[in-house]
């Protein structure tokens, strides 16, 4: 028995000494000697067959063996912890950290804020209206005749309920909604979504955004419209931007105009270039259309109960996507709505 004890102790201590510092390897040795079926444990079980006279001595020797093996294993485990700390110290704190990506507003929202802020800075206030409209506000109050093509079911999204409701095709109905409830003078801008059943391509979307403008008061003149819009054009596209008005037609303004700015890509050198190197944006014309505008038609004032002999006003409406496309040089309107963060994160 004494020899067995000595043998087990020698084996255990040399195995512990030779073992790697890995905690798992040390644990395996602990089980081999001190576990339920371990060599040391087995020796304790043999105590039953030891003659009573030898029991005290054998007991002491066995306890000494158990303590020696336990101590050696504990010591080894302490080293293994030390080894773990060494690996920790190898972390390179100069490596770049893991950054969290922060979200931000959509480029269309950003453009809407920019347009509205600019008009607010010259005295306009921001008003909103419903996206689901009636024929009354989308067409009738705006003097759009019954036979007008935009009233056709193919040109407007009608809701199922007996063609009573539709998705507004422009933000202009907010003009008459606002005038019915407010007395002039006032100046408002109206941002919002509009809907048209256009087939989607690089420059068309069935949903897009507009900002409407309306200023009504005593003696508001066409020159006031020109002044407000030229401040807008310079603020949005740079101080060198020039503007021109072309005669046009809208049922709710008279006279009406389409407003162009000097091309933001070729800086209105388009006309000088030969046909081969024509500007891809303005096609060599030197001008690009950005909005529709005009003086509020007296018929519209009559519909909302204003006296057209007493008040005058101007109105304009612009497409937000178009403004953003020109400002940022974007080639495809669909990019705004695909939610690809590689595109969106650039703004
Ligand atoms: N509502 C017109 C459109 O969507 C734009 C416009 C607004 C024109 C106000 C004149 C005055 O095309």
Image (cartoon, rainbow, N blue to C red):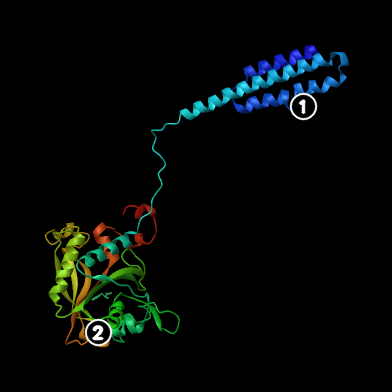
Q: Residue furthest left?
A: 272
**Relative image position of residue 227 (x, y in whole percent):** 14, 70
**Residue at coordinates 88% horizontally, 16% vertically from top-left?**
52
**Relative image position of residue 164 (x, y in whole percent):** 41, 84
- Nearer to me, 188 or 328: 188
Q: Earlier in the sequence, mark 1 or mark 2?
A: 1
**Residue at coordinates 65% horizontally, 19% vertically from top-left?**
72
Q: Quadrant of the C terminus?
A: bottom left
Q: Secondary structure at mark 1?
A: loop
What numbered label is drawn on residue 154? none
**Residue at coordinates 57% horizontally, 25% vertically from top-left?**
80
Query: Within the image, what quadrant is residue 41 found in?
Result: top right
| Mark 1 to mark 2 CA distance (whole Å) | 100 Å
Which residue is labeled 1 in the image? 37
Q: Residues within 10 Å of mark 1 (few under 14, many from 20)?
A: few
Q: Which quadrant does ligand 1 occupy?
A: bottom left
Q: Residues within 10 Å of mark 2 (few under 14, many from 20)?
A: many
What numbered label is drawn on residue 300? 2
Instruction: Look at the picture and state if 89 lies above or below 198.
Output: above
Tell which tag, 1 or 2, sits nearer the viewer: 1
């Amino acid at each position: 028995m004494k020899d067995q004890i000595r043998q087990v102790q020698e084996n255990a201590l040399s195995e512990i000494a030779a073992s790697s510092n890995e905690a798992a390897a040390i644990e395996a040795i602990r089980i081999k000697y001190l576990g339920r079926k371990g060599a040391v444990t087995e020796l304790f079980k043999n105590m039953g067959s030891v003659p009573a006279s030898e029991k005290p001595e054998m007991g002491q020797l066995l306890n000494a063996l158990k303590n020696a093996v336990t101590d050696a294993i504990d010591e080894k485990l302490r080293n293994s912890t030390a080894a773990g700390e060494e690996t920790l110290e190898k972390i390179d704190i100069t490596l770049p950290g893991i950054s969290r990506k922060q979200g931000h507003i959509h480029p269309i929202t950003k453009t809407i804020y920019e347009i509205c802020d600019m008009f607010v800075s010259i005295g306009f206030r921001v008003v909103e209206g419903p996206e689901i409209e009636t024929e009354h506000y989308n067409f009738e109050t705006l003097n759009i005749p019954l036979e007008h093509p935009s009233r056709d079911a193919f040109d407007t999204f009608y809701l199922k309920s007996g063609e009573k409701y539709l998705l507004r095709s422009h933000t202009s109905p907010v003009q008459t909604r606002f005038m019915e409830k407010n007395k002039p003078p006032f100046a408002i801008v109206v941002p919002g979504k509009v809907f048209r059943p256009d087939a989607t391509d690089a420059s068309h979307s069935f949903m897009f955004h507009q900002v409407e403008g309306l200023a009504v008061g005593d003696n508001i003149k066409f020159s006031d419209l020109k002044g407000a819009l030229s401040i807008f054009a310079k603020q949005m596209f740079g101080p060198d931007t020039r503007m021109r008005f072309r005669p046009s037609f809208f049922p709710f303004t008279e006279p009406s105009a389409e407003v162009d700015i000097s091309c933001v890509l070729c800086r209105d050198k388009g006309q000088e270039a030969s046909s081969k190197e024509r500007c891809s944006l303005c096609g060599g014309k030197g001008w690009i259309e950005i909005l529709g505008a005009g003086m509020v038609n007296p018929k519209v004032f009559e519909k909302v109960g204003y006296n057209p002999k007493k008040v005058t006003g101007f109105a304009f409406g612009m497409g937000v996507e178009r403004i953003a496309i020109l400002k940022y040089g974007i080639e495809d309107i669909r990019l705004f709505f695909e939610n690809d963060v590689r595109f969106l994160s650039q703004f």
